[in-house]
Image (tube, rainbow, N blue to C red):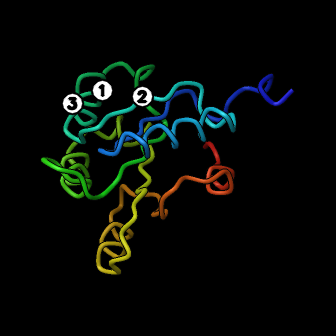
C-alpha cells in the first residue's frame, strides 16, 4: 500500500564518489517513497554540468540535491561555490543538503552558513532524516 502513494519529490540527485553510499542512499530514497527518480553522479562536476545543461528545462531540475563534501577532483565545497553562480530559477527549484562523514566542526559551520544549503546530515541517509524534509 505504501507504494501506491505519490513520492514526496519527482527528482533527486545524489552526488558521492563512493558507489556503495550512492546505492544505499538511492535505495533509501526509493524504498521510502521520498523520490520518484534518483539520478546518481560520482563527480560533483558532472552534477553541476547536468544542472547547467538543464537550467532552462525545469522538468529536468531536481527538487533535492544530496552531496558529499569530500570527493576527488571537485569537492562539495567547490560545487557549492559554482552552484551559487547558477541562476535563481535553478536555486529556487533545487534544495541542497550536505551528506557527509566529516566530523570537522569547521566544515559543518562552513556549510551551515552557506545560503544555498538547507542542512547538514551525517551519513548515512536515514528514513527519519527523509521524513523531516517537507516539500514547499
Between the C-alphas of marks 2 and 1, the distance is 16 Å
Which residue is tagged 3? 49
Mark 3 or mark 2, earlier in chain? 2
Q: Indicate the position of residue 135 as horizontal and vertical percent values.
A: 62, 42
Label 3's element?
helix
Question: Which residue sits at x=16%, y=48%?
Answer: 74
Mark 3 or mark 1, earlier in chain? 3
Label 2's element?
strand
- CB of mark 3 within 8 Å of CB of mark 1? no
Choose mark 2 or mark 1, whichever is in front: 2
Label 1's element?
loop
Q: Quadrant of residue 4?
A: top right
Which residue is tagged 2? 39
Question: Which residue sits at x=67%, y=50%?
Answer: 127
Q: Indicate the position of residue 90 as horizontal and vertical percent values.
A: 35, 36
- CB of mark 2 within 8 Å of CB of mark 1? no
Residue 47 appears left or right of 29: left
Residue 4 in the image: above or below residue 135: above
Tell me, for residue 55, which label it has, or none.
Answer: 1
Residue extending furthest toward the right: 1
Q: Residues within 10 Å of mark 3 (few under 14, many from 20)?
A: few
Residue extending furthest toward the bottom: 105
| Quadrant of the drawing holding the N terminus | top right
Q: Indicate the position of residue 42 as horizontal and vertical percent values.
A: 29, 37
In this view of the protein, which residue sits in the foreground, 134 or 38?
38
Amino acid at each position: 500500500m505504501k507504494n501506491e502513494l505519490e513520492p514526496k519529490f519527482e527528482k533527486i540527485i545524489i552526488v558521492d564518489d563512493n558507489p556503495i553510499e550512492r546505492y544505499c542512499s538511492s535505495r533509501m530514497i526509493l524504498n521510502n517513497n521520498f523520490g520518484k527518480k534518483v539520478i546518481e553522479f560520482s563527480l560533483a562536476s558532472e552534477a553541476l554540468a547536468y544542472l547547467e545543461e538543464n537550467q532552462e528545462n525545469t522538468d529536468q531540475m531536481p527538487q533535492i540535491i544530496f552531496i558529499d563534501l569530500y570527493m576527488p577532483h571537485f569537492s562539495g565545497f567547490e560545487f557549492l561555490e559554482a552552484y551559487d553562480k547558477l541562476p535563481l530559477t535553478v536555486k529556487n527549484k533545487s534544495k541542497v543538503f550536505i551528506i557527509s562523514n566529516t566530523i570537522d566542526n569547521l566544515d559543518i559551520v562552513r556549510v551551515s552558513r552557506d545560503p544555498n544549503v538547507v542542512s547538514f546530515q551525517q551519513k548515512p541517509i536515514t528514513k527519519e532524516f527523509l521524513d523531516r524534509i517537507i516539500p514547499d
